[in-house]
Amino acid sequence: MARFYFAPLALSLFQAGHLLAQRLNASTSGAVQMHPSLTWSRCAVAGSCSVVNASIAETNGMMWYNDDLDIHCWEDHVWNGDVCPDPETCYDRCAEHPITDYRELYGITTSNDTVTMKFFTQSTVVNVGNSVLLLDPTSTQAAPTNKYQTFFPLNMEFSFDVDVSQLPCGLASSLSFKEIPADGGISTDPLNEAGAGAGTGNCDGRCSTDRQFIHGLPNVGNMSGACCNEFRLWHGNAVSETMVAHPCSAPGLTTCIAASSGGACATPSCDVTGCEFNPFREGTPASFYGVGPTNALDTSRKFTVVTQFITNSNSSTGALTSIRRFYIQDGTTLPNPLPQIAGITQTDEFTDQHCAEQKVAFGEANVFANLGGLATLGSAFQRGMVLEMGIDEDRVDHMLWLDSTFPPGADPQKPGARRGLCGTDTGVPADVETNNRGAQVVFSNIKFGPIGSTDAFEVTVGSSPATGATRQEAETAGGVQVRVGAVG
Ligand SMILES: *[C@@H]1O[C@H](CO)[C@@H](O)[C@H](O)[C@H]1NC(C)=O
Ligand SMILES: *[C@@H]1O[C@H](CO)[C@@H](O)[C@H](O)[C@H]1NC(C)=O
Ligand SMILES: *[C@@H]1O[C@H](CO)[C@@H](O)[C@H](O)[C@H]1NC(C)=O
Ligand SMILES: *[C@@H]1O[C@H](CO)[C@@H](O)[C@H](O)[C@H]1NC(C)=O
Ligand SMILES: *[C@@H]1O[C@H](CO)[C@@H](O)[C@H](O)[C@H]1NC(C)=O
């Protein structure tokens, strides 16, 4: 998870009034955090999309806590033991400052449908990594009624453009659907009075223990993990990319106890490893994805990622049975490549069967299936998902699981060990924080709607392009699909 720390001599920022932590200080309850605006498109059918004027909330903003005497409650990645000997004391004494400048503090800028996030930002403090949640513009922006945008992805399609050209080995961008409480937990957590506008209630399918707050309480000592159903549509840099499903045994946000401070939860309620579809790991030639024109998807330039959530009844009430993916760049549509691993059926669809075959081929336990697989995620999709976009390093595994050979010491010949072309010595935080300070991701052109509504394309088969052909028809025809025009 992203983090934030104080540079030497960096104390002067805390002169503004307090906006309180996860509760609202009555004397400042009128304060509203600044939220960069971001538009996205809600599509009905192809060609009919309407713009939603939304905004985003940083969830890496929880470090702006001081007590009444302006002592930093959060410093050097930990709660200050003097003011935060325990969660309750910390909660009583500390308060959040309003975030008034996303660009200066977080390196986040937006323009219409585009958000740019820097990996490393130095102002009077240093910020490493970012994570933003999309807010619902129909809710007010002030607590307690502020809300995240809720997506119901079943039988729908989600599309976005991403530019990962400035994301080298060891760093990654991500875009996820997570079962975060839409109100940030304000209605259920007595100690959370800040709500969605302050980015509260975040959780993930890895049950991460590096959340600063869980249920409104400071996570002192990183002894708790926050778990929730998650489908990461995108986790990628210029070298590798993957999508990952993390089903959980319980709905909503649940907590688990870490075996040690900052360690993994002993009995997480989610499939923390998840089932993923990383084309390179599935045996696709490296020339499918990478920097430069020799790659089918040239990561030196932006491209479109389209994801479809198919149910067994072709309706929003059916069970999630398949997730389909295609990519678009320069008007050319690329289907998800077919796995090239012995024992894995050559399908471009993300299904329970694919996960089962992959886990056997890669020699991993199928926790994904034990937790109900895609059907479990589908149930979460029916309850509603929140959209998160982020950029980060990986302090534990150095992102080797995404772009290199993993786990450390694994035989590269072993199926599933190689995930990308990055060296096993890449992604060390001290290294990337020094040498890759210019790293950034640009997300844009988010669209959501019924299957086929966000990106119209035609198929070039022989001499008679068939406009509006379905993706399956295109693949069956074996054609390269040519997009005839962006919709919306
Ligand atoms: C969104 O913002 C644009 C530009 O300010 C405006 O023209 C449009 O009416 C807004 N749409 C909605 C639904 O508010
Ligand atoms: C609450 O706000 C008041 C007025 O700004 C301030 O004096 C007080 O220190 C704040 N409480 C905390 C815990 O920051
Ligand atoms: C943003 O949208 C407005 C209104 O549609 C338009 O005038 C402006 O050129 C756009 N800006 C950019 C950078 O695309
Ligand atoms: C604890 O979590 C914070 C983020 O809340 C992180 O910055 C820090 O590195 C974590 N510490 C450990 C020991 O995991
Ligand atoms: C769902 O739609 C696909 C084609 O888009 C079709 O092949 C399939 O039979 C449909 N399934 C049901 C249950 O209607």
Image (cartoon, grey):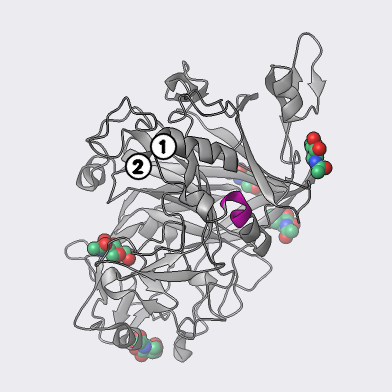
Q: For the residue carrying disc 2, how many other residues have a C-alpha within 10 Å: few (<14), some (14-19), or many (20+)?
A: many
Q: How much space separates mark 1 and mark 2, taking CA atoms? A: 7 Å
Residue 473: % across, % down:
76, 25
Could you say which disc has been placed on residue 171 in the image?
A: 2
Q: Position of residue 279 (x, y in %)?
A: 49, 30
In percent of width and height, residue 380 lies at 61, 60
Magenta stretch, main secondary structure class:
helix
- Mark 2: amino acid: Leu
Q: Earlier in the sequence, mark 1 or mark 2?
A: 2
Q: Is residue 394 left or right of residue 357?
A: left
Residues under numbered marks 1 and 2 in contact, where contact means CB atoms less than 8 Å apart: yes
In this orientation, does residue 307 appear?
no
Asked whether residue 442 is drawn in magenta, I would say no
Q: What stretch is highlighted in magenta?
A: 373-377
Q: Is mark 1 on a helix, strand or loop?
A: loop
Q: What element carries label 2?
A: loop
Ligand 1 is located in which of the four quadrants?
Answer: bottom right
Nearest the viewer among 433 and 340 is 340
Would residue 346 appear left or right of 441 to someone viewing this image? right
Q: Is residue 301 above or below residue 145?
A: above
Closer to us: 20 or 92? 92
Is 354 positioned to the left or the right of 73 in the image?
right
Reading the image, the residue beneath label 1 is 237
In the displayed orientation, state which residue is furthest to the top: 463
Tell me if residue 374 is in the magenta stretch: yes
The kind of residue on which mark 1 rests is: Asn
Which residue is at a point 30% across and 27% down the rendered structure image? 412
**Label of residue 149 in the image:** none
Question: In this picture, is 38 found above or below 302?
Answer: below
